[in-house]
């Protein structure tokens, strides 16, 4: 892990890098420090979320508090806006705001901007612009292209400093992703690493040790308060490449553990362990977000209600997510993340929330007390939605993979407290395999179903085909993406659902995004993984014809 003893600002980091580099080429580096001492370019951030056939969610983060009008127009000059919605940003929302616009035409491009609505600048448009296309109606067999990705900023991988010798900058992957001109981007979680530091040294294997190629993340390398979460979200989102991407490609967001803290779930953090749990493992009341080392091992966070509430609030502040009613006490903001999105005749997207309702990782999954990752209401919603869907393809978004093991902490017998669906080995009692098998068998019972899972979390790329009942017929597929920018991953494949692995890049640092296309006339679905430069990854391709 890189040294985190010195925490510096973006501007200070630029000066640091320029100073080191100037030992070899002083004249070439003077401009860099001067440029980065100026105010950040992306002080005003815009993003569109969850576009549907008649509207979308519009989100903004502004540099100062005030009232603003969201103007939405079919033409880029805003001479006759179709919608004008007033909202206010203030310190209580971290200078973020969002509105939902409805009543728009389907399959139509819209542009939007902010106009100041109070003070001396009343009526003055802000310079940033964003655009999106509304979804086609459910009877329209239009083509669709979506991108998907996960894991941004983990294991010390941060934003690259402009002008560094690698010739890459910021979050590099968002440059080629923007050029894809996709209909929307599915963020599968871990789009924030609130519990991981980022220093000036880029850990990329191709870069020299001791480099200063990165913009350090402000703060001590972990979060403890709402303001800390906001600071980290700003670091991730103010990158110009990321910002430009989200201005033109709508975002469909869910979360995973690192938007809170490693391997965590809301009920575990909010409720804490029972007396019986503590008898089995006395560590389960640990809650220090700094995760101090004891006997050389970093402590886990199991119980911290304040951290859970702050992280969830920040998730909704910093992502354009529609306002949906809560379904459990664990929703402090009376909001929920799981939802569906229809795009024409061929696609219905089911976005799962694998963190808000899950049983604690240290509870055993038994016949008498089966564990849940989704909670009863979300599971019923998913199964009913899959059964009722009339779309050619049902695509299910799960932040954690179906067959790759996950988890970091162990019980007294050495068994891993599982973080993802599978147990990972037959003797491990801590996965969520019973619930997953119930879902998988419900899909397998529908011979005409066309189901694909999009998953993330484990930092390496996989393609799987599943024959749940072993009858020789593939029941569904999984596209498990590697990281957008984080360290390499690995993991054992669980055999609970009888998977057949079609592709893997396990053990290599291969920063990646996925692209999913469905053809308009045929309904044929293609998944292709790309590297951070936008090049197709050889062999990382899945082509599926729909079953009718």
Image: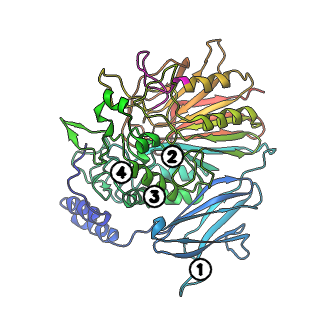
Camera-side residue: 14 or 194? 194
Q: Is residue 255 left or right of residue 211?
A: right
Tell us which disc is closer to us: 2 or 3.
2
Q: Is residue 41 above or below residue 308?
A: below
Tag 3, which secondary structure? helix
Q: On the image, numbered disc 2 is attached to which residue?
A: 330
Which residue is disc 4 drawn over? 158
* Real-space CA distance between mark 4 and mark 2, rounded to the nearest whole angstrom: 31 Å
In the rendered view of the protein, which quadrant contains the N terminus?
top left
Percent position of residue 17, x then y: 25, 59
**Mark with earlier residue (3, 1):** 1
The Cα atoms of the two marked residues, 3 and 1, are separated by: 25 Å
- Badge 1 is on which residue? 117
Q: Residue at x 65, y 11 (%)?
A: 471
- Residue placed at 51% from the left, 52% from the top? 332
Asked which secondary structure carries label 1, the reply is: loop
Residue 432: say if magenta: yes
Q: Which residue is mark 3?
A: 237
Local packing at callout 2 (Cα closer than 10 Å; few below 14, some 14-19, many 20+) is many
Q: Earlier in the sequence, mark 4 or mark 3?
A: 4
User: What residue is rendered at 30% in x and 66% in y?
Assistant: 11
| Range covered by the magenta-colored residues | 420-434
């Amino acid at each position: 892990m890189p040294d985190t003893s010195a925490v510096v600002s973006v501007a200070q980091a630029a000066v640091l890098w320029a100073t080191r580099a100037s030992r070899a080429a002083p004249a070439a580096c003077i401009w860099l420090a001067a440029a980065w001492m100026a105010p950040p370019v992306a002080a005003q951030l815009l993003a569109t979320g969850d576009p549907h056939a008649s509207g979308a969610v519009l989100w903004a983060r502004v540099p100062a508090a005030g009232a603003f009008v969201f103007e939405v127009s079919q033409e880029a000059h805003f001479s006759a806006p179709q919608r004008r919605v007033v909202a206010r940003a203030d310190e209580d929302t971290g200078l973020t705001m969002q509105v939902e616009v409805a009543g728009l035409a389907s399959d139509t491009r819209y542009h939007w901007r902010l106009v100041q609505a109070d003070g001396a600048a009343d009526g003055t448009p802000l310079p940033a612009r964003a655009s999106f296309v509304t979804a086609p109606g459910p009877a329209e067999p239009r083509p669709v292209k979506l991108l998907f990705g996960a894991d941004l900023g983990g294991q010390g991988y941060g934003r690259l400093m402009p002008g560094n010798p690698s010739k890459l900058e910021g979050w590099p992957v968002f440059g080629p992703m923007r050029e894809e001109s996709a209909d929307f981007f599915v963020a599968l979680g871990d789009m924030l690493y609130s519990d991981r530091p980022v220093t000036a040294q880029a850990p990329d294997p191709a870069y020299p040790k001791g480099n200063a190629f990165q913009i350090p993340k402000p703060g001590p390398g972990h979060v403890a308060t709402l303001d800390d979460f906001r600071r980290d979200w700003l670091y991730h989102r103010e990158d110009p490449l990321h910002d430009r991407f989200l201005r033109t490609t709508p975002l469909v967001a869910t979360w995973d553990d690192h938007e809170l803290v490693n391997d965590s779930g809301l009920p575990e953090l909010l409720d804490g362990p029972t007396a019986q749990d503590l008898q089995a493992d006395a560590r389960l009341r640990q809650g220090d977000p700094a995760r101090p080392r004891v006997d050389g091992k970093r402590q886990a966070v199991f119980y911290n209600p304040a951290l859970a509430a702050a992280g969830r609030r920040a998730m909704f502040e910093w992502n354009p997510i529609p306002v949906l009613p809560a379904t459990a006490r664990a929703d402090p903001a009376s909001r929920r993340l799981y939802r569906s999105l229809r795009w024409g005749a061929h696609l219905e997207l089911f976005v799962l929330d694998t963190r808000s309702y899950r049983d604690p990782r240290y509870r055993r999954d038994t016949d008498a007390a089966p564990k849940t990752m989704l909670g009863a209401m979300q599971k019923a919603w998913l199964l009913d939605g899959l059964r009722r869907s009339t779309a050619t393809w049902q695509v299910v978004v799960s932040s954690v993979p179906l067959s790759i093991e996950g988890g970091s902490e162990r019980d007294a017998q050495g068994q891993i407290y599982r973080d993802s669906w599978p147990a990972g080995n037959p003797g491990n009692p801590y996965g969520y395999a019973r619930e997953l098998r119930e879902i998988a068998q419900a899909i397998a019972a529908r011979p005409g179903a066309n189901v694909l899972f999009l998953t993330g979390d484990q930092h390496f790329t996989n393609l799987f085909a599943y024959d749940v009942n072993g009858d020789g017929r593939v029941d569904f597929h999984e596209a498990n993406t590697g990281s957008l920018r984080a360290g390499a991953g690995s993991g054992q494949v669980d055999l609970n659902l009888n998977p057949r692995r079609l592709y893997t890049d396990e053990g290599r640092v291969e920063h990646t995004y996925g692209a999913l296309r469905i053809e308009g006339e045929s309904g044929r679905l293609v998944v292709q993984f790309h590297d951070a430069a936008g090049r197709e990854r050889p062999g990382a391709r899945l082509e599926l014809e729909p079953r009718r």
